[in-house]
Amino acid sequence: MTSKANTVAFQAGERNIFFHILTACNLSCRHCYINTSQHGTTTLPKETMLKWLELFADPNKKSNVIFLGGEPTMHPDLADGIAKAKELGMAVTVDSNGYLFNNLLEKTSPDLLDYLSFSLDGPDPSVNDPIRGEGVFEVCTTNMGKAVAAGYNVSVIYTVSNLNIEHLHRMIPLLQDIGVKRFFIQVIGLRGNSAKTSAGEQGWQVSPEQWLDVVPRVAIQAAEAGIHVTFPKVFLDPNEKFECAGLVTENFFIFPNGRVYRCPLCEDHPIHALEIKNETLVPNQNMRLTEDNFFQLNIEEGCVMNRLLQPDTISYDAQGKPLHRISCCLLKQEILPV
Ligand code: SF4
Ligand code: SF4
């Protein structure tokens, strides 16, 4: 099998709804980005969850909703949320840590849930469990197998850091064994726990050279093995155009305290562009500057929020010119089996 690479251009007329229905989780991953001081500890009541879904429904747009947490399967009414989203015409994904609480596989069905995505950060317990917790690999891979057997489309998200990049290639035989057809490779962001905790001497973040050397190569190998791979572009080629998703697409990152961000890099700060008040989506009036003011800034480093929040990710030449422009974190590269 061969493969084909595409940059996934931002789609006008499409909306992506990243819906955090609670912030609680049974795990304590070392790189967890959940920030309860910014987003609270509420579990959205069922009726609120269903009403908020309606706020983002638009029959004229292709809409994708991704249920997130915390651990979304800890929400006792997740299956009702999935059914409502499908009724509203949305494509539905659940991102789980693999524990699949509340009998999710029995409570919903592959007809309603388009993708069930599992987070796994290593091809065996010795790599995954020091990051995600003792015993997590076993539970997660067992439940992936059960989900495949029950007819669900299963995907896997692997967050690349210095702790696991050298093991990325070993995910391919594991995904093939389990029957996983889609593989999302993520880059670790310096947010939440990974901004506060040490990953040891080498730090969390991989260098541009390591990323560019390893990730595209493994993605091609996975595609050649029949797996559809998506990973963030991260570094723009010199002639590639920079675009900020906040200006050209409709992405909504909803938190249970009512904050609605347009950019995930902003989520640790109260600069959300929108909020839900009295079951209505309104602009955030509490701040003079919100994230949408930053989206307008045009800088040679590319993404302005990356420059402000993660300046260590950018290297400069002797003239002070950035060696790489950083793409929007939402711009993806896709490698397809052909
Ligand atoms: S599974 Fe997700 S929400 Fe839970 S601790 Fe890990 S990263 Fe955080
Ligand atoms: S990551 Fe950067 S480029 Fe993308 S939406 Fe946020 S500010 Fe814009």
Image (cartoon, rainbow, N blue to C red):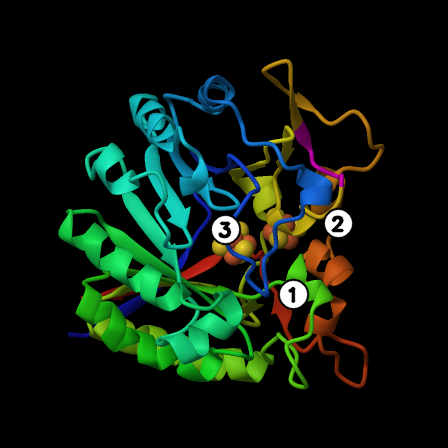
Q: According to the image, label 2 marks what residue?
A: 297
Q: In this view, does 261 lie above or below 170?
A: above
Q: What residue type is labelled 2?
A: Leu
Q: According to the image, label 1 marks what residue?
A: 194
- Can residue 134 be seen here? The reply is yes
Q: What element carries label 2?
A: loop
- Residue pictured at 50% horizontal, 51% vertical: 26
272 inside magenta stretch = yes
Mark 3 vs ligand 1: CB under 8 Å? yes
| Span of residues in magenta | 270-274
Which quarter shows the N terminus? bottom left
State the image coordinates of residue 281 (x, y, percent, origin top left). 61, 20
Using the numbered discs, state the Cα–Cα distance from disc 1 to disc 3 in whole angstroms: 18 Å
Give the mark toward the camera: 1 or 2. 1
- Can residue 108 be seen here? The reply is no
Q: Which mark is residue 26?
A: 3
Among numbered discs 1 and 3, the one appearing first in the sequence: 3
- Residue pictured at 59% horizontal, 63% vertical: 31
Q: Image quarter for residue 87? A: top left
Q: What residue type is labelled 3?
A: Asn
